[in-house]
Amino acid sequence: MRPDGWYLTEDVDDFLVRAGDFLRSRPGLHVMPLTWAARLRARGAEAYGTEAPVFGVLEQAGEVHATFYRLPPRALVPTPLTPQQADALAAHLVALGHSLPSVSADHDTATAFAEAWQRHTGATPKLRDTRLCLYRLGTLTPPEPLPAGRGRVLGEQDLEQVMFWCGEFAKAVGEVVSMDADSWASTRFADKRYTLWETPDGTPVSIAGMNPMIGGQVQVDIVYTPAQLRGRGYAGAVTAEVSRAALAAGARDVVLFADQSNPTSNALYQRLGYRKLTDWSAYDFSSAAPA
């Protein structure tokens, strides 16, 4: 244990022993570390790169106050931090010789850490244009009327169709990912359960996925409708379908992210009963090397 209280480890099980109860105490705000810790336990760290992951736990007076994780060369992802905690973390990582390309967190934390990283390294932070809103489901209110058709859960026999839709989603959001049978298992899309909304003649028109339940919580991810089919209620129908399925499976909380720049999707989720938990942002750093 360092004097500043930050404990670092490369072992996901060690991380969860120390911080699991803390993460599960606020599963909505802690959705990212819960999700990625579960993925690493299920697939092994080698599935996500050649460098070892790094986990951090802030322990003070025997209590956990914050955590972070990082899968190099990806961003640092901390749980909510005060400005003082953010500064201490930045100083700690610099002292250990860590380099960072970016930070991704709730907006206040990301901003506080970006400013601290600049103070300690001289790197200039740049706020990404894409900013997200994290929502949690209150009372599910399915759209009325529903568009004609039905939801259909996709299984292993539908892999080609799942890969096609996930590939279309990835292209739409600018995400670079290989999408074929050989690389599928190593993508973040592989551990989800997908539901298609189909028109009465069986034509697929919209898809939504949901992550496995972790700590009593399910994250809805992804939701996608082709541009030419939007505005017909398909996204609302399929999102309501997976949200209902999550609740039926016993989820106490259901969460999802939405792009703040898309007023249509944000309004849709709010009509379905989702309420904002926090804004989410990322900063890229001009230099990845500590000064």
Image (cartoon, rainbow, N blue to C red):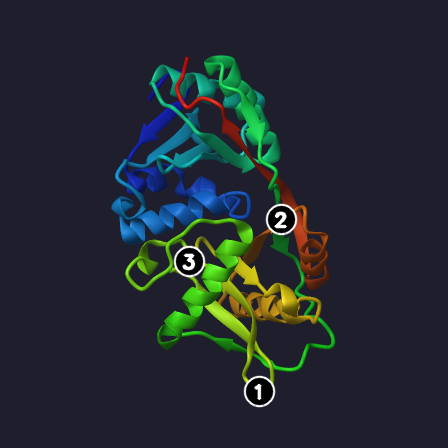
The kind of residue tagged 2 is Asp
Residue indicated by mark 2: 259
> In the image shown, does 249 or 159 lie closer to the viewer?
159
Distance from label 3 to label 1 (Cα)? 27 Å
Q: Can you say whether 256 is above or below 241 in the image?
A: above
> In the image shown, does 8 or 147 lie closer to the viewer?
147
Residue indicated by mark 1: 201
User: Which residue corresponds to the image point at 67% horizontal and 66% vertical from the top-left?
Assistant: 230
User: Which residue corresponds to the image point at 34% horizontal and 62% vertical from the top-left?
Assistant: 180
Q: What element carries label 2?
A: strand
Q: Can you say whether 224 is above or below 88 in the image?
A: below
| Residue 181 locus on image (x, y percent) | 31, 64
247 with respect to 158 (left or right): right
Q: Residue 75 carries which label?
A: none
The image quadrant that residue 279 belongs to is: top right
274 with respect to 71 (left or right): right
Distance from label 3 to label 2 (Cα)? 18 Å
Residue indicated by mark 3: 189
The kind of residue tagged 1 is Asp
Visible residue check, residue 206: yes
User: Which residue corresponds to the image point at 41% horizontal and 65% vertical from the top-left?
Assistant: 163
